[in-house]
Amino acid sequence: MLEKIRSISLNPPLVLTLGFALIIFIGACLLSLGIFTRSGQSIGFLNALFTAASATCVTGLVVVNTLEYWNLAGQILILTLIQIGGLGIMTLATLFPLVMRKRIGLTSRQIIREQLNVESFSGLVKLLRYVLYFSLAVEAIGALFLAIVFVPDFGLKLGLWRSIFHSVSAFCNAGFDIMGNSMVDYRSDIIVNFTIMTLVIVGGLGFGVNAEIFSKKKRKSFSTHGKLVLTTSLVLTVLGALVFFVIEYNNIYSLGSENLGTKSLVSLFQSVVARTAGFNSLNLGAIRDSSAVLMLMLMFVGGSPGSTAGGLKTTTFGVLFAATISVIRGEESVRIFRKKVPTETVLKSLALVIISIVIVVGFSFLLSLTEDFAYIDILYEVVSAYATVGVTRGLTGDLSNFGKLLIILTMYMGRIGPLTMAFAFGKKQKKSKLEYPDANIAVG
């Protein structure tokens, strides 16, 4: 028994995988209690499990309206799960040792390195301390800006609570809201929109990139990783906003009746939050199918490694895009910002894309067999769950029990990451000393 526990502790991906599962289970057990609901009635274990998984995996899909169904205690519990899921189990677990200036063991460092998606142990504790302090500071600042609008609208206590809740939810890229209809009522408010967007962007860039931004003044001193994250994020956000604006400009059910300023603001907001934060400032069920496809692509790419966001990741997309350009140009190696990308990185990116496509297509196919909805809406739901975005076209509450279980699994796999799960449960392969001859295979 002790040997088994020891083998688990020496496998960081397995610790993270089981750790998230344990937090979700504990959250589900608590949320299934009637003391957390306004009515005093239990939501049922399956729906509690769905809510706990969505919060811990910082997704935002809900089977009931968060404002109307959960009381204050329930909302606090959900926000706690969001904070744990966003910052990571091990990050918060080491908070006490850091404050007490205790030494963090090697095993814990290995798990933290896996969680933050960094390559070396060098400066790991310093980065961890930065993650904790930076996150709390950004969330506090975000809450203060939101309070400028929410306190006058809802009073001091309720206004502050809603400011804190939405600041944490936005920074953790969760998308949970206690407004009742997300940010639809504030679609024209510049302070609310830009505060939420800034929190989502900062949370989705990755803690390592944020550390570079706030510690280095010149762009040339940025790492290749940092440059790729910032460039890809900017291009996707701007292009997404422009295309959404053009498609929905005359759609009377979405942007058609709004003025030019609101149309622009809503388009930018939807482009930003489509990258794994499930807020919305208009009825997504009313947007055109072409806009839904656009958002599917943005959701699938998602945020950046080592962040609170999910999805394929901007760097994965960037590496494969650069590899494609290299093939077209007939170049022997893949280069990004005058640096050569290792073949191992390209292959890992390709593996991530293939696995993600198989999961999304496979799960959406299974749901199409059991759920009576249009396939694009089902695909939208699955991609939203896998990329931990949390936006929906109105399906979530009407899913069958099988559908809810499948979406729970999708959210879990999306938050953990397919390769992390593979490393957690797969057997380590020893390097072979044999060299095989090259295979001559025609492709294309």
Image (cartoon, helix red, strand yellow):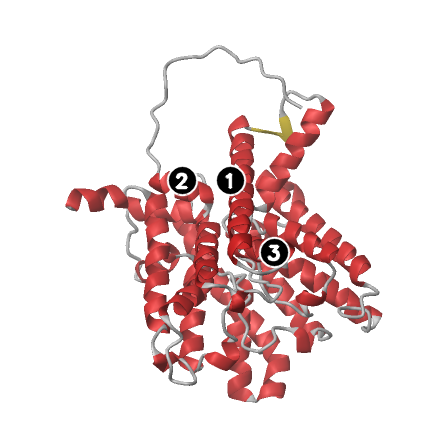
Farthest bottom residue?
Answer: 155
Single out the mark in the foreground, 3 or 1. 3
Residue labelled with disc 2: 422
| Front-lying residue, 10 or 383 | 383
Quadrant assignment, res 246: bottom right
The disc, 3 or 1, on the residue closer to the chain's N-terminal end is: 1
Instruction: Tell me what residue is drawn at x 66 percent, y 41 percent.
Output: 220
Height in image: 181 above or below 53?
below
Position of residue 8 in the picture relative to residue 310 (left or right): left
The disc, 3 or 2, on the residue closer to the chain's N-terminal end is: 3
Q: Which mark is residue 355?
A: 1
- What type is the residue that disc 2 sits on? Ala
Report crowding for label 2: few under 14, some 14 to 19, many 20 or more residues within 10 A (C-alpha).
few
| Pointer 2 with pointer 1, Cβ within 8 A | yes
Q: How far apart are the two marked residues, 3 and 2, measured between alpha carbons?
A: 25 Å
The disc, 2 or 1, on the residue closer to the chain's N-terminal end is: 1
Instruction: Tell me what residue is drawn at x 60 percent, y 60 percent.
Output: 373
Farthest top residue?
Answer: 437
Q: What is the secondary structure assignment of the residue under circle 2? A: helix
Q: What is the secondary structure assignment of the residue under circle 1? A: helix
Q: Position of residue 100 (x, y in %)?
A: 30, 62
